[in-house]
Amino acid sequence: MKVELKKIDKLKRTIKVEVEGEEFLKEKNEVYSKRSKDLKVPGFRPGSAPLDVLERHHSKFLKEELLKESLPTFYRKALEDQKILPAGMPHVYDIKLTANVLSFSADFEARPEIEAKESNYKGIKIKIKNCEVKEIEVEKVLTNLKEGIKKVINKDLEDGDLAKWASYPDIKSLREAIKAQLFIEKSRERRQKVDNQVRAHLLKVFKVELPKDEVTRHHQELVDREIYNLQRRGVPQEDIDKYKKDLGERLQSVAEEDLRIYYILEAIAKNEGIKIDNNIGDVVLGFVLNQAQFSS
């Protein structure tokens, strides 16, 4: 297999691939053999016709199947040969297929190469506040609960009746439950603030060139998701259509930031030998947080 790679800009690449000789004939024979079982040739049982005879009777179909199966295979092999990781799908063109040769060209964007220096992600300084639930906050929840119930039953409830209405044996138990729930909410908010500090730091110290096609794809995913959520909430389609332009502009920066963070975390994972899976964000952010310096 002959591979010619051209670097167009920081990420855009063009690759030309030509496969011939035994490598091509082996792939061709394997594809044709698999397909021959379902093809009929006069005078032969299914799957028993010689490949040259089969090709004469089903040339167009077999060539289409050969391209469908072998072109992606040789594209991946060419990328492996050049040690390149692509971002998104390629634009394949100049496809030529003869009896002995397959050649094609492909334009694609490479994934950004990021140098993950430990000094950029270890020992990050994080400001954090202790989670503390004050009595006044519990009282506020109780007051809101009382007012909400009063609107339903048109009556003020004493503490004991309020607790029973909320399925608790006494007011003390209800207060403890409210306090626990508030603590959980504060803990969640604190973790979000910590994550935001980490993301802001990583975005500042790492410079990432983004593949344009990947940004476009992710941006469209975000827009589609937001529109779907609006539809589920019953927002009229007319209002959604008016909102689309502002929505697209607002989510552009979100899409870019999401991808930058993803590629940064991926680079950190590679540098630290962390196995990459669908939860790369949680896993690598957790690792970075374990290395961080916290202060109140």
Image (cartoon, helix red, strand yellow):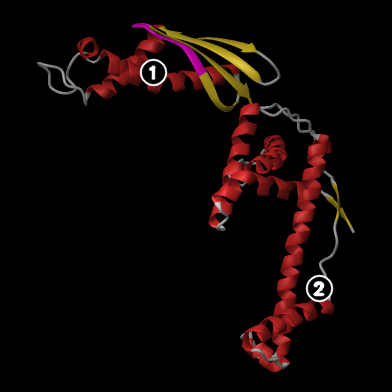
Mark 1 crowdedness (10 Å alpha carbons): few <14, some 14-19, many ≥20? some
What is the secondary structure assignment of the residue under circle 1? helix
Q: In the figure, 126 relative to 187: above or below?
A: above
Q: Which mark is residue 133?
A: 2
Give how far across and how far down residue 275 sits, in percent: 62, 41
Residue in view at x 70 percent, y 26 percent: 113
Q: Residue 99 magenta-drawn?
A: yes
Q: Nearer the viewer, residue 177 or 230?
A: 230
Circles 1 and 2: CB atoms closer than 8 Å:
no
Q: Nearer the viewer, residue 140 or 169?
A: 140
Q: Which residue carries the number 1 mark?
A: 67
> Is 229 placed left or right of 10 in the picture?
left
What is the secondary structure assignment of the residue under circle 2? loop
Q: What span is colored magenta in the figure?
A: 92-100
Residue 180 location, quadrant:
bottom right
Q: Main secondary structure of the magenta part?
A: strand
Instruction: Identify the amino acid type marked 2.
Output: Val
Q: In the figure, 27 relative to 240: above or below?
A: above
Q: Earlier in the sequence, mark 1 or mark 2?
A: 1
